[in-house]
Image: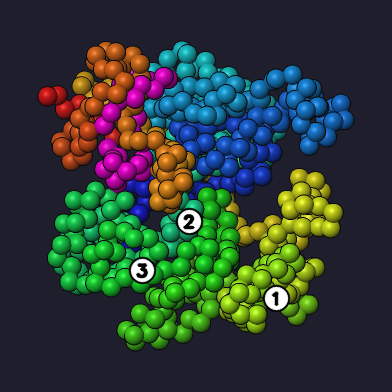
């Protein structure tokens, strides 16, 4: 089982299907910034994908930059470019349930629940391509905005459509695919790009490998599975604690491989310490479908080992000769390629463990590390032999190949006369251009043909409010919603305290004021919590915002609807 909750897995699998079906090619971060018009449907990009939000701000400046280019002003000359642009905002449109930090860069914004955001998207698709199905009963303000968005996207040379899993619904994702398909039938065909944000850095990789959901795994445990092995997954964060505890209650053997002290680890029969991403090598598949190899920064210590090595040792003890034969990370990559055809392009990597530059490994440490001998001089003058790295082309020292390193393997940017990152342009084909020697990673997913109308389905029906209930809008926070940020004290203090958000009109209609503690539950009683109220200007009536991942809020998938529990 891949360990993702069922709803999250379904959304990630939908994104994977759409990337393969091909409404348009997925955009890299650099391509997103180079687009000159963008529509964001249902996603708070600043909180769920901050680097993408940065590129969308650059996207919003592309058309104003044209005035600077006509005057011969280079793009890197920021002050002169801003002066030439005269504060003009490019065609960036944001449709989301709650205010976002990207709103100030947008030409127009709209507050809408996921269903209404999707209906606007289908209206844009219909305005671009009359063959697309129009939504029924769309009001004139939304219809007028849809025509305006369609006009700006149609006039763009490189339009971009953005959506994602952050809103917890499939409708905006399908609507984004419909807009991309409509744009591909216009003058920008072949230059249209889409971007779908995903829950975590390797969500798409987990979807490629496949497997059952977390709910399937818990059900198997309740039916009497003889044992459980949890590999780097905090089950209590992904499902309600009561459900996890009930499933684990009768399991005779629980093994945990993790680097975090989770509740499962405390209840485990055996716990094996896993290396962090900084102590191990591996491969991530990002939301673009790009497989990217990452390498150790420092060697693991104190009995810590990478998870795949623990799995190999367990398999050896169980008599699995195929897995027991794994010696290097390249062996694992080859095994993944045999299990999943989409991953077959990853191994053997051209930068495998045996890669050398003029017969030498690439040094991790810069020449300034020559002073490292003084670190332990008070203990011993004799320097220890650097540890070996059997899985990558790097050495844990400053000795090795200093020149001719391929772009994807550059451990740092340094050039005589320049300081650190200021030297990056010395390693690019041109200023702000691609790296010499190729970009990192390898794209595994490309559109396999023109998209069909059935790939994104018809527009959803109009959103209907329920008396006495609120439609839940998931709210994400860079600090707090992400798992590791909650565990680092210096970062965790930047996370907000748990809260329930309502718009000013909604709070006033119920006689509620800021700070009031409200008991809320899912209709039917499956989810319940008590939270202080925060008034959030811009949140539509009938909508309640619930933050994702904060301590003090029941973990697992949020309900679609909640109601106030009256005293």
State the CA–CA distance, disc 1 to disc 3: 31 Å
* Residue topped by disc 2: 202
Q: Is residue 536 magenta?
A: yes
Residue displayed at 42% across by 84% down: 324
* Residue topped by disc 3: 257
Please state the horizontal and vertical placement of residue 252, each as a whole percent of the image.
17, 71
- 32 lies left or right of 315: right
Q: Secondary structure at mark 1?
A: loop
- 20 lies left or right of 410: left
Q: Quadrant of the N terminus?
A: bottom left
Q: Is residue 352 magenta?
A: no
The furthest residue to the front: 378
Magenta stretch in the rendered image: 531-559
- 216 lies left or right of 480: left
Residue displayed at 45% across by 54% down: 203
Disc 1 or disc 2, which is closer to the eye? 1
Label 1–label 3 contact, CB within 8 A: no
Q: Earlier in the sequence, mark 2 or mark 3?
A: 2
Which quarter of the picture shows residue 511?
A: top left
Residue displayed at 66% across by 59% down: 440
438 lies above or below 239: below
Please state the horizontal and vertical placement of residue 538, each as a whole percent of the image.
42, 20
């Amino acid at each position: 089982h891949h360990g993702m909750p069922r709803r999250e897995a379904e959304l990630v699998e939908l994104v994977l299907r759409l990337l393969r079906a091909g409404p348009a090619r997925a955009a890299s971060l650099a391509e997103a910034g180079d687009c000159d018009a963008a529509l964001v449907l249902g996603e708070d990009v600043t909180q769920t994908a901050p680097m993408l939000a940065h590129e969308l701000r650059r996207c919003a400046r592309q058309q104003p930059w044209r005035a600077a280019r006509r005057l011969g002003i280079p793009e890197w000359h920021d002050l002169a470019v801003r002066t030439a642009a005269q504060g003009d905002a490019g065609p960036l449109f944001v449709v989301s349930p709650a205010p976002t930090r990207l709103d100030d860069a947008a030409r127009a914004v709209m507050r809408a629940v996921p269903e209404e955001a999707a209906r606007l998207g289908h209206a844009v698709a219909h305005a671009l391509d009359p063959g697309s199905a129009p939504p029924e009963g769309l009001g004139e303000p939304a219809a007028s905005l849809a025509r305006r968005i369609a006009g700006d996207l149609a006039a763009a040379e490189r339009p971009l459509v953005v959506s994602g899993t952050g809103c917890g619904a499939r409708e905006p994702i399908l609507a984004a695919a419909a807009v991309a398909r409509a744009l591909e039938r216009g003058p920008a065909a072949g230059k249209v790009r889409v971007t779908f944000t995903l829950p975590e850095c390797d969500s798409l990789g987990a979807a490629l490998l496949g497997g059952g959901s977390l709910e399937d795994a818990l059900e198997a445990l309740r039916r009497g599975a003889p044992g459980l092995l949890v590999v780097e997954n905090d089950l209590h964060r992904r499902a309600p604690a009561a459900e996890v505890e009930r499933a684990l209650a009768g399991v005779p053997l629980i093994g945990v491989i993790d680097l975090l002290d989770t509740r499962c680890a405390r209840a485990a029969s055996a716990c094996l310490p896993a290396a962090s991403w900084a102590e191990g090598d591996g491969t991530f598949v990002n939301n673009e479908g790009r497989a990217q190899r990452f390498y150790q920064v420092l060697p693991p210590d104190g009995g810590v080992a990478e998870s795949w090595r623990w799995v190999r040792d367990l398999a050896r003890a169980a008599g699995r000769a195929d897995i027991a034969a794994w010696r290097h990370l390249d062996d694992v990559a080859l095994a993944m390629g045999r299990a999943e055809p989409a991953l077959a392009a990853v191994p053997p990597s051209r930068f495998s463990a045996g890669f050398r530059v003029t017969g030498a490994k690439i040094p991790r440490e810069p020449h300034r590390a020559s002073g490292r001998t003084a670190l332990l001089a008070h203990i011993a003058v004799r320097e220890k032999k650097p540890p070996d790295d059997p899985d990558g082309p790097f050495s844990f020292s400053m000795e090795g190949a200093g020149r001719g390193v391929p772009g994807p393997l550059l451990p740092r940017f340094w050039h005589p006369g320049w300081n650190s990152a200021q030297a990056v342009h010395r390693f690019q084909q041109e200023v702000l251009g691609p790296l010499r020697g190729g970009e990192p990673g390898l794209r595994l997913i490309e559109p396999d043909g023109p998209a069909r109308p059935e790939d994104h389905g018809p527009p959803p029906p109009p959103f209907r409010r329920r008396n006495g209930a609120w439609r839940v809008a998931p709210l994400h926070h860079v600090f707090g919603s992400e798992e590791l940020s909650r565990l680092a004290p210096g970062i965790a203090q930047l996370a907000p305290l748990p809260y329930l958000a309502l718009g000013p009109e909604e709070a006033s209609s119920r006689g509620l004021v800021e700070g009031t503690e409200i008991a809320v539950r899912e209709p039917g009683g499956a989810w319940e919590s008590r939270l202080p109220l925060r008034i959030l200007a811009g949140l539509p009536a009938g909508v309640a915002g619930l933050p994702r991942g904060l301590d003090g809020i029941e973990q697992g998938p949020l309900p679609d609807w909640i109601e106030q529990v009256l005293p």
